[in-house]
Image: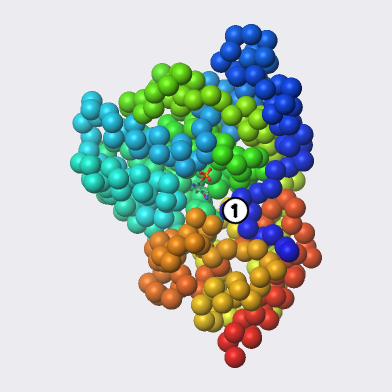
Amino acid sequence: MIYLDYSATTPCAPQVMAAMIPYFQDRFGNPSSSHAYGREARAAVEKAREQFAEFIGCSPHEIIFTSGATESNNLIFLSLLLDTNEKRRKIAVSEIEHKSVLLPAKNLAKRGFELILLPVTANGVVDIDAARDLITEDTALVSVHTANNEIGTIQPINELAEIAHRVGAKFHTDAAQALGKMPFNLQNLDSDLASFSSHKIYGPKGIGALYIRGGNSNWPWEYPLFGGGQESGIRPGTHNVPAIVGFGEASHIISHNRDHFLSRLLSYTQSFEDMLTTKSSNYIIHCQNSSRIFGISSIYLDCPKADLILESIADIAVSKSSACNSSSLQKSHVIQAISSDPTMSDRTIRVSFGFDSDESSVSKLVNTLVNAIQVISK
Ligand code: PMP
């Protein structure tokens, strides 16, 4: 079996596993305890916070650990919803956000907020001119992901942050897919809030982070959860120490091997797309000429339904649009946003490469896909 679905999730790196194991066993303390076991666990959590902060270019006190990007995204929308002092009633998100942004935004729209869906062009990027008209003085929050999880397009987040700030709105970016697949540093980004996930960067699942520029004193709205006050009271609950340690280690590995890592992802994507071009004409790579993160190719296959292709290439793990959509019968909202052809979504698959990929898996994928298209099209 060949795994080419690294945008859905990545395996834990061996160093990540090794770093985590002691915190399940001998170093099992609760970081909130004041005795030696607690202090040891607390030190591990703070080390991981430093590792992650170094990786994304911020200060450790600006990081809150959460259970993943879904929770980070939800915390933002929930706290805005709960804040009775917030007089602004509009929120703006791109129409191709991950569901963990789209659905919380739609929830607010049912409860007194006006939801503006920022349109994207056929190139899969937010239409800046439209955004300029739609983001107005009564907008409380603009949330646009750094890069899309299905088609990999990099969004104009600096321009969008500037538009948001010009009218006094907060700007949030979901950077779950961007991390590890493009140069990313908060020093170069004027964002108030950002969400991250560990399992997309060779760390464990169920852990992630929320960046708050300036730290918890800058949290703009109500605190949405209540409990023991951990993570500055914004995300209370006993720390998942092994997962936090693994997330920190994964961040450390990628930040110290960044160029090597990015160049490998780029070379797999390029050889895949070049090889496909020479062997077949029955496909389109979505947004091929847009600026895209490394490692993702979203391909429209010019043949009957893509799920038939997925069945016929069962020994290669790729995905239909995204992992979060693949079990639902709904069409991909991302593909629908970039194409007026209603069949596009059914005939699109997403291939995503990772550090463990190699050239032979790339050529096996191309040959298998080309054969499958021929057989199914007969
Ligand atoms: N946002 C984006 C852009 C994603 O790709 C994902 C994962 N598919 C998420 C959020 C959710 O992340 P997590 O699995 O950490 O909750």
Residue 377: give x, y in percent of width and height.
58, 87
On screen, residue 322 versus residue 122, left or right, reads right
Residue 187 lies, with reference to residue 105, above or below; the image says: above
Q: Quadrant of the C terminus?
A: bottom right
Q: Quadrant of residue 267?
A: bottom right
Q: Nearer the viewer, residue 209 or 121?
A: 209
Residue 143 lies, with reference to residue 34, above or below; the image says: below
Q: Residue at x 39, y 74 (%)?
A: 342
Residue 149: give x, y in percent of width and height.
52, 54
Q: Residue at x 39, y 42 (%)?
A: 143
Q: For ligand 1, tell me if the residue under mark 1 lies within 8 Å.
A: yes
Question: Label 1: which residue?
Answer: 7
Q: Is residue 170 visible?
A: yes
Q: Residue at x 47, y 72 (%)?
A: 346
Q: Is residue 214 visible?
A: no
**Few, some or many residues within 10 Å of mark 1 (<14, 14–19, 20+):** many
Residue 258: give x, y in percent of width and height.
70, 41
How many labels were placed on the picture?
Answer: 1
Residue 232 lies, with reference to residue 244, above or below; the image says: above
What amino acid is found at the position of numbered circle 1 in the picture? Ser
Residue 1: give x, y in percent of width and height.
73, 64
Q: Nearer the viewer, residue 31 or 54?
A: 31
Q: Quadrant of residue 244?
A: top right
Q: Quadrant of residue 274?
A: bottom right
Which colour scheme appears in the figure?
A: rainbow
Q: Residue at x 72, y 36 (%)?
A: 16
Q: Secondary structure at mark 1?
A: loop
Which residue lies most toward the front here? 25
Which residue lies most toward the bottom here? 378
